[in-house]
Amino acid sequence: MTSVLDSIIDGVRLDLELRKSSTSLQQLRDQIQNTAPAKNAAAILATRDFSVISEVKRSSPSKGHLAQIPDPAALATAYAAGDAAVISVLTEERRFGGSLADLDAVREAVQIPLLRKDFIVEEYQVWETRAHGADVVLLIVAALGDAQLHDLHALSLDLGMSVLVEVHNADELDRALRISPRIIGVNARNLKTLDVDLAVCHSLIPQIPSDIVAVAESGISHIDEVVSLATSGARAVLVGEALVTGGSPEQTVREWTNAGRAARNGEQ
C-alpha cells in the first residue's frame, strides 16, 4: 500500500521536473553567487535556552485548509517581532499550498534564519534552497536511503546551510546520528499514516545527545505542551497550525518562547 509520504513525494518529483525544465542547475549556482551567505541557524539555536521555529503554513494533508496567508511576509514579520529564532516556510505546493515565491517574499521581509520546509529527495533541491535564500534545509529520514541522507546532508553543509534532520522512531534516530547532525527534529506525526502522538517526542528527545539541538515537531497546540516538551529536553518547537489559526502569532511565539525557556531553566 502506498503511504501518505510516498504519495506526497510522487507529487514533489513531478513538480520538481517542471522546475528543472525551466531553471537549470547552472542557473541556480549562478544565483547563489549573488545570494548573501547562509546564517548559522544551528549555532543560533544552540546558544538560545529555548526557541520557537515558526511556520508559514496554509494547509496540510491531515487538516486540509488552515489559513489563507495572503501576505506571508507580514506573517513572518510578526513571527520575528515575537522573537522566533527561525522561520519555516512551506514550499510544497500540492498538499501544503506553499511555493518558492513564499520563501522569496519572507526572505525579503526578515533577517532571521529561514528553513525551507519541503520534501528534499534530490541534490537539485538543495541548490534550489540556497539559491532562494534559505539558511536551513529539511531532510526527512523516512524519505531517504542512507546514502541519499549522507550525500544531501554533506551538500547542504558545503553550501553553508544548517540541516534539520527529521526522525519519527528509534530506527530513524539511529540512522540520523550516523551522519553527525547538529539539529534533529522529532516529528510527532507519522508521515506514513498522519497519526500524531507527542509521546514520540517525549520518548526520543531524551535519547538525543546534549550537543545536538533537539526540536519537537507537530501536534503542538498549547503552552502546557511546550513546557512539557522543554522539560523532556526539547531545545525548540516547530509550530505552524497553532500560529496561523490562533489570531495572535507574535504574542504566541513570545509567550511560548518564554515558557519553554523557563521550563528548561527549572523556573516552572
Image: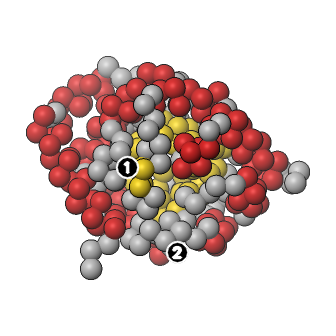
What kind of element bears circle 1? loop
Q: Mark 2 points at which residue?
A: 170
Dot 2 surroundings within 10 Å: few (below 14), some, or many (20 or more)? few
What kind of element bears circle 2? helix
* Residue positioned 26% across, 47% down in the render: 123
- Check residue 145 in the rendering and tell me which mark sits there, or answer none: none
Left or right: where does residue 132 sit relative to residue 161? left
Q: Which of 22 and 30 is in front in this view?
A: 22
Residue type at mark 2: give it: Ala
Left or right: where does residue 200 sit relative to residue 179? right
As drawn, the residue found furthest toward the bottom would be 1
Residue type at mark 1: give it: Phe
Distance between mark 2 and mark 1 Cα atoms: 27 Å
Would residue 244 be seen by someone viewing this image from the given angle? yes
As drawn, the residue found furthest toward the left would be 21
- Check residue 96 in the rendering and tell me which mark sits there, or answer none: 1
Camera-side mark, 2 or 1:
1
* Residue positioned 24% across, 30% down in the render: 29
